[in-house]
Amino acid sequence: MSKKPAILILGAPGSGKGTQGVTLGKLPKFFHCACGDVFRSLDTRTELGKKFVEYSSKGQLVPDEFTIDLWKAQIDNWKDSHVYFPDADILILDGIPRNVEQAKILADYIEVHQVFHLSCPDRDELARRMRKRALRSNRIDDANEEVIQERIQTYEAETKPIIEYYDDAIITDINAAQEPIKVLNDIIEKIISLPIYEEMKKVVL
C-alpha cells in the first residue's frame, strides 16, 4: 500500500489547530481529519466499534495501536465512500498522532511532508481561548481551570515530543498568537512551496 501524503498540525489546546485544519480541509486538494472525527464517525456495531465501547465504557484510555486501527478504518471508509481521494488529496491531520508511539505506527500508512507547530508560549492566552470555546459550545466542564491546566500539561508531556520525532527540515513554527487569518496565511505560504503540493495539484480525477 502506498503511503498517503500528509501534513500535521500540532499545538497545545487553544492554539487553533482545529480552526486551521477545518479551513484547509475546505480547499480543493486537501482533506481534513481530526481525531474527534474518527471517534464521532465510529460505527459501534462493527467489531472495532464494539471494542472501542469496551474501553470507553470502563473509562480506559484507548491503546495506541487500536487508535490507529480506528483511524485507518475510517480513512478507508471515507475513501470507499468517495469523500477522500488519496491519489489527489493531501491529508491534514490534527489531534492525531497524539504521542510519539502513534506517530511511529502511522509511519506505515502516511508520509509526512510538513509539520506545522502552532506555538503559543503564553499559557494564560491558551486558557482564555479554551474557556471562551467551552462556554460558546456550552461545555461548562471544559471551562474548569483544573481541566484546562490538565489538558495543557498532557499536551506538554505526551504530544509536544512528537516535534522531536520528525526531521527538523519539515518542521515549521507558526506564531499562534496572531489573528487566525494571519496564521492561515503563514501556513498556506509554506504549503504552496512544497513539492508534494505541486505534484498533487496536477492530479485530475
Image: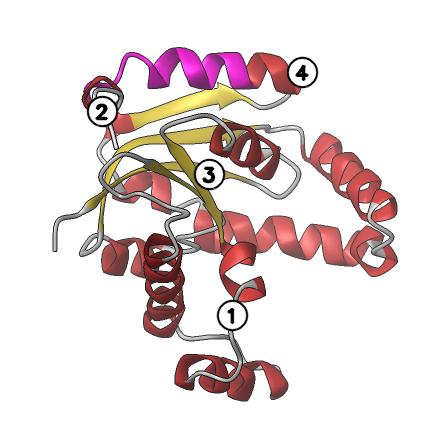
Q: Separation of disc 4 and disc 1 at Cα?
A: 34 Å
Is 99 one of the magenta-colored residues? no
Per the image, label 2 sits on a secondary structure element best described as: helix
Asked if disc 2 and disc 4 are in contact, CB closer than 8 Å, the reply is no
Instruction: Find the residue positioned furthest to the front.
Output: 205
Quarter of the rendering occupied by the C terminus: top left
Q: Is mark 4 on a helix, strand or loop?
A: loop
Residue 71 in the image: state x and y as whole percent: 39, 62
Q: Say what secondary structure mark 1 lies in.
A: loop
Dot in front, 2 or 4: 4
> Which of the 4 image quadrants contains residue 140?
bottom right
The residue at which mark 4 appears reads as: 179
| Mark 1 lies on residue | 42
Q: Is residue 108 left or right of residue 145?
A: left
The part of the chain drawn in magenta is: 184-195
| 171 over 43 or under it: above or below | above
As shown in the figure, which amino acid type bears the numbered disc 3? Leu
Kindly report the distance in space between the C-alpha atoms of the residues bearing marks 3 and 1.
Answer: 23 Å
Tell me, for residue 10, which label it has, or none. 3
Q: Name the residue under label 2.
A: 169
Q: Which amino acid does label 1 sit on?
A: Leu
